[in-house]
Structure formats: C-alpha cells, structure tokens
Amino acid sequence: MYVVVSYDIPQDKRRTKIHKVLKSYGQWMQFSLFECNLSDAEYAKLRARLARLIKPDQDSIRFYFLCACCQGKVERIGGEMPRDESIFLV
Amino acid sequence: MNDQEEDMGTVYITQEDAYIGKTDERLTVRAERKSLLDVPFIKVDGVVVLGRATVSPAALNELLERQIPMSFMTSTGRYLGRLEPELTKNIFVRSAQWQAAGKPEKAVHIIRGFIRGKLKNYRSALLRAQRDYPELQLQTALSRLEQAIVPIDKTPEIDALRGLEGTGSAAYFGCFNQLIRVEGFHFATRCRRPPTDPVNSLLSFGYSLLRHDVQGALNIVGFDPYLGYLHVQRYGRASLALDLMEEFRPLVVDAVVLSVLNKRFLKPTDFTAEPLSQAVSLTPEGRRTFLRLYEQKKQSAFKHPVLGRKCTYQEAFEIQARLLSKYLLGQTQQYPPLVLK
C-alpha cells in the first residue's frame, strides 16, 4: 500500500524521533511529510512504533492511503523526487 | 508476489573500505567519515560487497534476521563467499534433493533440463543475431548446437550429457565474437581465473553476480545450494546454484554483456590490465555502469512460458527453484527449464 504520512509534533526532540522512525519505512519528501510503500505487516509495525512515541494530546500523525491508480497520478513540482529503489550503488 | 517485492533492490558496495552499519531499521554505508547510503532494510533484498568492507555486528545481525543474503567479491568481481541466512525450515525439499542424488533417473532428468535450457537459449540467441544481421556466419555453430540438443533426451549417462553440454557451449562461444559488433572488443575463447581480456572479464563478473542471485533464490525455497547434480560435489562449492545458473547464463549475463558492448556503454578505456597476471578488470566507473545495467536486466519483465504470466528475471530465479522443488517432491512430472524464444 502507498501511504502518505504527515505529522505535527510541537516538541523538537519527539519530532526528531518520529522523523528517524519514518526514515526506516519510507522517503522524506517535505517537512513533516513522508511517502511510504509498505506491506500490511510493515504498516502495522510503523503505526505501532509511532503510536508509542507520540503524546496524543499534543501531537498528531495522519496516514493517507493512495490506491494503485492514484499513486501514479501524484504530481511533483520541485523538491525531493522519489528515489530509485531497484538498485543501491555506492 | 506482491507489489512490495518488486520495489526491492540489491545494494552494491564498490567503495573500498566502506563501513556497513545499522541505524534504526536502516542499512547505512559510510566511508571516509561521509555517509554514502542510508536505506530502509525493507527495501533491500540482497547485499553485494565488492572489495573490502567492515560490517558492524548490528548490521550482520539484522541481515541474518531478515534473511537478506550478502555476497563478497573481490573488487574485480571474483566470487569469494557469502553470508547465508539460515536455511528455511523446509526439510522436505532438502530431503527430496538428497534422495534424487541417489536416484539416477531423477538426477538425469534434472541435468537434462538444465542442459536443454542452456543450449536452447544459446540457440535462440544465435538465431536472433542471424535474423538481425543476415551477413553473420552462424550456420555451422547453429547446426552443431542442434546436434547437441537433439540427443539430450535419449542420453542416459550423466557424463555423456556433460559432453553434449561441452559441445554445445563450444559451438556457441566459437561464434560469440561475431555477436560483438563494435570496434575495440574481441572474443577468442572463454578464459577464466583470471580473465585476460575485457569480454571474458565481463562474462566472469556477470556470472558472479548471477550466482549471488540464484543462490539466494535456492536458499529461499529451502534447497541446500551445495548439493548439485550437473556439477558434482566439491568442498565449498555451491553446485546446485551453478546448476540452476546454466539456463540463465545466456538469458541474463550474456545478453547484458553484449548489449553493454554493442550499445557502447563501455569503451576499451573502461578496462585496466594487471601487469603480472594479465588479469583484466573494469575501472570503478565502468563497474558502476555494468552493475546498473545488470540490475536493470534483472528487473525487466517477460512472459513466463510455463506459468503464462509476467515476471522479472529476479522473480524467475525463485520460480525456477520452486518448479525444481515441485519436481523433486513428486508434485509434477517434469522440471521445465526457462527457455525463451
């Protein structure tokens, strides 16, 4: 599934932690916004990890799901482009 | 296969003295105090280290836990060995694999499949070249290949089958030079350990990479890669991986090598020769070009003739391993090698 994750975390330290976790599951596209291509299990794990980190009364995280059809229709002008995940060469 | 698996890629580390570590659930590669790579483990399905690298204990642990195989090669692409995650617990596959080694008729059927697959793919490669370039002199090689293919199914002795494979391969490599259609590259005969010309060095490098992928697929399906049929047992040799590679050699490696050369992605200046051993290898830049094209080939899709659906070569390694396991377990009557027109 293709998930767009956005978050609003007032406290810097907690926001950094959330950011680090999200980097393990997807790609950072903009401030407070990630795009992740995940299996059901990976999504469940990510969600659980994030749920443990946030303070629900101050923070918020949103998961927006894109269907396969809509995923291809995302338009991007400027900024980060999705990385090539078929090969990692260093 | 779900769509996630198509998104996974192999990590190739060509940077000398890189440090491979783990941060959160990501694989990181650093060198000279700079971060070179930082990717989630969920996007990685294999790691190939070319040259020297340090792997942190945490990264090793994570690779094993996630069953991500890691192969080590010299910087010139000679295969050294690999970190193999635990074999799958499917004892039935391994037990059937061992039993077939003692049953000549099953082993012979499998060997016939590997050889038929390889030689038929050689033949299609030559036929395609003949069609595209009618001026090539491929008829002799084609008829010699044909003479090696026809008796395969009537030959009961394993050594005689190996002989047919040898004849067929000799015919194919005898005219391989004609398939190279650019100035500056020449192929005389297959030579290894070390390869002493650019074409042989590309072939050897490609076969090393293919071995990493095929051995990984065999491991996922539950085979013991060290017990083969066509390649006899030898200490420390992944014989079954070498067996299953046969049908893929022309389809994946030879095809990439020829297209790299004929489309001029690599020039003679992308190769260097070692003064003493005459070993020829790629420059770092050339190596990156070749790795990228090999990976592209692996991810390219075609219609699987037996399953009748689209798959990539990367998936086909595993599909062929599963078809082999089905035959060994008695669930199918025969092993169909991957033969593409």
Image (cartoon, coloured by chain):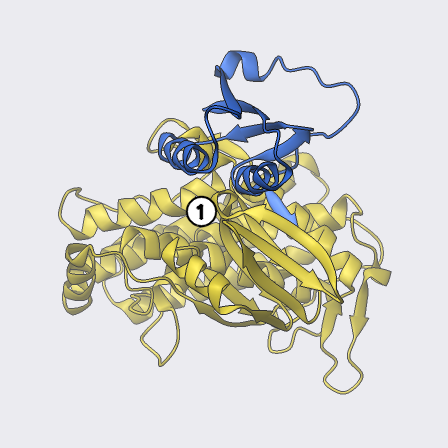
Chain colours: A blue, B yellow
Instruction: Tell which residue pokes out farthest to the front in this image.
Output: A57
Q: Residue at x 59, y 29 (%)?
A: A9
The one nearer the camera, B221 or B9, is B9
Side of B17 relative to B244 (left or right): right
Q: Mark 1 — on which chain does it sit?
A: B
Binning the other alpha carbons within 10 Å of mark 1 as few (below 14), some (14 to 19) or many (20 upward) gives many
Side of B83 relative to B320 (left or right): right
Instruction: Tell which residue pokes out farthest to the bottom in this image.
Output: B276
Q: Residue at x 13, y 48 (%)?
A: B330
User: Residue B44, percent across and down?
Assistant: 51, 47
Q: Amino acid at mark 1?
A: Lys
User: Residue A83, percent across and down?
Assistant: 66, 36
Query: Where, by quadrant of the figure, is residue A7 drawn?
Result: top right
Circle 1 residue: B120
User: Residue B101, percent across and down?
Assistant: 20, 67
Q: Residue at x 60, y 55 (%)?
A: B28
Q: Residue at x 48, y 59 (%)?
A: B212
User: Residue A52, percent across and down?
Assistant: 41, 37
The one nearer the camera, B200 or B220, is B220
